[in-house]
Image: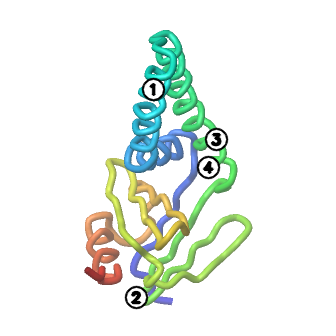
Amino acid sequence: MNEKFITRTNFNKSLCRDFVSYINLHRQIWLYVVVLVVIGILEYVNNRSAERVMMFVLVMIGMYFISSYISSLILTKRNGKFLKIRFYEHHMFAETEHKREKITYELLNRIVERDKCFYLFFTKNRGAFIIEKAGFEKGSVDKFYDFIKSHLPVKRK
């Protein structure tokens, strides 16, 4: 077959922790901030107790870090040891040690480039792929971003 790119990502704790941190920074942290502010104000109005508000804030901050740590552990265990993706002109094949699946580019939502990897997000809560830049077996990192961008569906306004 005529693959454009072949990538292999070997999952480790650092890679998964970076991904969870990216997701938390862009999604969950705002929810935590809103909950902290609203409940902190309500608690202070009801009891006029700054100690209870501070205790609540500290517990919420602790929960945020604990949930991030647990999420990265789950991601590391769930993904297995590796993810190999073969990119073709109209589709891609994703392969793990247990499964192989054909995926069309219509399911892609966006791509995010980081220092060591790419995050390839799918439409509506279907997850994401982590693609290590060091794991390119065929094709170049520089051309990969442009290739994926050209295959992303056009967003409707």
Tell me which residue sits at (45%, 12%) in the image.
50
| Placement of 58 over or under 9, stated as above or below | above
1 and 2 marks in contact (CB < 8 Å)? no
The kind of secondary structure element at disc 3 is: helix
| Front disc: 1 or 3 | 1
- C-alpha distance separating marks 1 and 2: 53 Å
Q: Amino acid at mark 4?
A: Leu
Please state which amino acid type lies under the numbered disc 3: Leu
- Mark 4: few, some, or many residues within 10 Å (few <14, many ≥20)? some
* Picture mark count: 4
The residue singled out by tag 3 in the image is 73
Spatial CA distance of label 3 from label 4 is 5 Å
Q: Are marks 1 and 4 in contact (CB under 8 Å)?
A: no
Q: Residue furthest right?
A: 98
Secondary structure found at label 1: helix
Indicate the amino acid at tag 1: Gly
| Viewer-side label of 4, 2 | 4
Q: Which residue is mark 1?
A: 40
**Residue drawn at point x = 70 percent, y = 64 percent:** 97
Percent coordinates x, y for residue 143 in the rendering: 27, 71
Q: Which mark is residue 89?
A: 2
Residue 75, numbered circle? 4
